[in-house]
Image (cartoon, coloured by chain):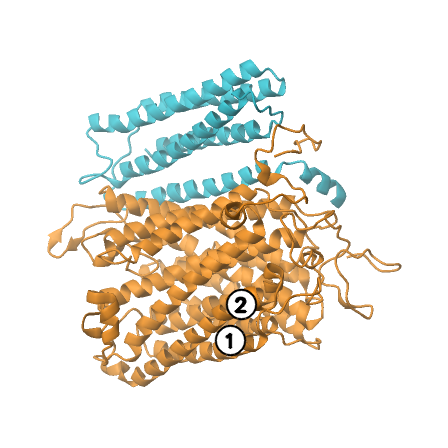
Chain colours: A orange, B cyan
Amino acid sequence: MSIETTQHGQQGVVTAPAHDHHEAHHAHHHEESFISKYVFSQDHKMIAKQFLITGMIWAIIGGLFSVLFRLQLGYPEMTFPFLEDIFGKWAAGGRITNEFYYALVTMHGTILVFFVLTAGLSGTFANLLIPLQIGARDMASPFLNMLSYWFFFLASVIMFASLFIQTGPAAGGWTIYPPLSALGQASEGSKLGMDFWLVSMAMFIVSSLLGGLNYISTILNMRTKGMSMTRVPLTVWAIFFTAVLGVLSFPVLLSGAILLLFDRNLGTSFYLSDIVVKGEILPNEGGSAILFQHLFWFLGHPEVYIILLPAMGMVSEVMSVNARKPIFGYLAMVGSMFAICLLAFLVWAHHMFVTGLNPFLGAFFVLLTLLIAVPSAIKVFNWLTTLWRGNLRFTPPMLFAIGFVSLFISGGLTGIFLGNSTLDLHLHDTYFVVAHFHIVMGVASFFGMFAGVYHWFPKMYGRFMNNTMAYIHFWVTFIGAYLIFWPMHYSGLAGMPRRYTDYSNWESFKQFAEMNRFISTVAMVVFAVQLLFVFNFFYSIWKGRKVTSQNPWGSNTLEWTTPVNPGHGNWPGEIPEVHRWAYDYGKDGREYISQVEPIGEGESKH
Amino acid sequence: MAEVMNVQRKKIHPHKFTLWVAIGSIIMMFAGLTSAFIVKRSQPNWAMLEIPRVFWVSTLVILASSVTIQLAVKYFRERNMDRYRSMLTTTAVLGFIFLVLQVIGFMQYRSMDIRLVGAGSNASFSFVLAIAGLHGLHVIGGVIALAIIAIRSNSTRRRNYSPVPVEVAATYWHFVDILWIYLILFFNWMK
C-alpha cells in the first residue's frame, strides 16, 4: 500500500517501492499483463465477471443434471441408449440407475444452491455493485477478494473432479445427512465422492467467508462522502445482510462438516451409533445423527436467505428504476430485511419436525417460522405499491423483477403450509416441498439474478444484451417455471415422496404418470431457453449494441456516473460526493435526479 | 450527532474492522462446536471428560504470549525496533511451544488409556481433539502471520511505519488466547 491511513486518521508515510500495488487507489493507468487483468485480477469488476461466468458454467451443468433425472422420471418405461454411451454402467441399458439418479439429484442441489445461487449470485453482484454503488475505488481488501474467487475456483475444480470418480460423486441429498454420508460401505455415493464433496465445501466456505468479510467491511467503511447508510441503494443493504448471514452461519456448517470428516476418516462417533450395515455391526456408539441436522440447518436455513436477499435487493432497485418511481417504504424494506436476517437464525428446526423433535419445542419454531410472513408481506406490499401507478418500462430486467414478485408470492404462500408442524408431518419429503422451495428460493432467485444481469450488463461490458432473445427467455422461463412446479403441489398433497427414481410400481401414484411426463417435457424446453440466455450473454459481450450514453436506464445510482467502460478505480477523477438518496424518481416534475446532484433551493434533505 | 458518529467510525482501519468481523465468524464456529458438545452430553453413552494436566501449562504459555505481543506493539509505537523484533519472535516461539504442548496433551490421553479416534473412541474425547485441534489450527495461522511480520520488519529494502499489521496480528493473537481460555474453562466445567 503506498499511502496508508493510520488509525488516527492522518496520512501515513509513503512506504517503499510499489509492493502491494493492488491497493494503489489511483486513477492513473499502468499497463496490465493478461494474467493480472483477466486471471489473477484484483479489480472488483473483473472478479464479479469471473464469479458470474463460473456460476453460469455450473448452472448449465446443474441444469443438465435435472434434465437427465427428469428424463428418467417422465419416461420411466423408456430406455435411452445414448445415456449408456455417455455414462456407461451408470445408465446400464439406457436407464438411469438408482445410485446415479441419487447422485444427480445431490449434485443438482449442491451445485445450484451453493455454486450458482450463492457464489454466482452474491459473488457477482456484491463484487460488481458494492464499490460502484457506494462510491469506492475497490473493495476494502482487493487481495482477499481475489482469494475469495480463487478459493471458489478451487472448490469448483474439486467438485467437478468428483463427477469423474469411479464410484461416482456424493450421493445422499444435498443435505448429506449421516449416517448414510458417514459410512463408505453404505453406498457408492458415500465413498470417495463424499470426501471430495466435503473438502470442496470447506474450500467453498472459506471463499464465502473471505468474500463476506470484505463486503461487510467495505460497505461500513468505504462509502463516499455524503453516502450515509440511509442513502445507499437497497441492493447494497441486501448484500450487507446477506454477508452478515453468511459470515455467522457458514462457520457452523464448517464445524458440522469437520466432525463428519472425522467420523468418515478417523473412526470417531460424533454422528454414529448402533449401526448395522449389510449384516456387519459397527463399533461406533454414542453418536447422534440428529446433531448433524442441527448443525447443518443452522446454516441451511440462513442459506436460503443468503440466496434470496440479494435477489430481493436487485429487484427493488430494478423495479424502482423502471417504474420511474421511488421505492415504496425504503426504511420498511431495510427493516424487513433485518427482521428476515434475524429470524433466519431462529427457525432452523422447522426442517426437523419429523426427527422426533419435542412437539412443545416445535410449537416455538412454528411461531417463529410464521413470523417470517410479516416482513415478507411488507416487502411484497412495497413492491406492489412501487408498481402502482408507476410509469412502467417493460424492459427485460423489469419483467424479471415483476416475475420475481409473482414467484415470491406463490412460493411464499406454500411456506405457510410447511411452516406448520401439523401439516408438515404430512407434507414432509413430498413433492409439495420440492415445489415450494424451487419456486420461492430457486426460480425466484434466478429471476432476481436475471434481472441483475440484464440490468447491469451495460455496466459490465459496455454493450446491451439482445432484447428479442431476452423477451423469449423471460416468457418461456416464467410460464415454464409455473408449469413445472405448480403441478407438483398436487402430487405432493397426494403424498408422492421425493427422491424416488420410479413411481410406476406404485398404484396410488399411477395417476401422476402423465403429469410427470408433462413436467419433464416443459423442463427440457425451459432448459433449452436458458441456453438461449447463455448464447445471448456471450454473443452480446462481443456483438451487442454498444452503450453510447453514460446512464442508459436513467438511473440515480453512482455506478452510472462512471465512464461507460470504467477502468480499475472506477472514476477517472475524484469520487463523486453524494447529496441525496438513490430513489428521487419523478420528483418535482423531473424524471430522475442523480444522487450526485446537490439539494436545490427549497428542497428538503433526504 | 450523525456527523460525529461518522467521523468516529472512519477512525477504524478497514483491515482491523475486517478482523473483528472474522473474529465474530470464528466465534460462531466454536459456539457451534461447544453447543454440539452440550447437546451430545445429554445423550447416553457419554464418558466423563478428563483433561491432561499439560493443557494448564499450555494455558500459561499462551497467556504469556499475549503479554509479549502487547509489548511488541508498545515497542513498535515507540519505534524501538530491536526490542520489537525480539518480542515478536518470542511470541511466535511461545505460540509454537503452545502447539507442541497441545500435541503432548493429546498423546497423554493414550497413557490414560483413552482413545481419541478410531474404534472404541468416545465422542466426548473426540470432541476435545476436534475442538482443541481446530483452535490449534487458528494458532498456527497466527504463528505464520507473526513470522511474516517479523521477516518483513527485518527487511532493509522496505521500511514500514504503519502499526496496522502488527496491531491486527496482536488483536488476533489476544483473541486466540481468550478463545483457548474459554475452551479450557468449558472443558473443565463439562467435567
- In screen coordinates, is A285 left or right of A435? left
Q: Position of residue A541 (x, y in %)?
A: 55, 64
- In screen coordinates, is B84 left or right of A178? right
- In screen coordinates, is A125 left or right of A581? left
For label 2, the residue is A450
Q: In the rendered view, would you say A396 is above or below B126?
A: below
- In screen coordinates, is B45 left or right of B20? left
> Which is more toward the observer, A22 or A151?
A22
Q: In the rendered view, would you say B125 is above or below A488?
A: above
Badge 2 marks a residue whose secondary structure is: helix
Residue at the limit of the structure toward the right, as seen here: A601
Badge 1 marks a residue whose secondary structure is: helix
Give the residue at x 23% y 39%. Answer: B122
Indicate which disc residue A473 carries. 1
Q: Position of residue B9 (x, y in %)?
A: 67, 40
Query: Which quadrant: the N terminus of chain A?
Result: top right
Give the residue at x 33% y 80%. Answer: A516
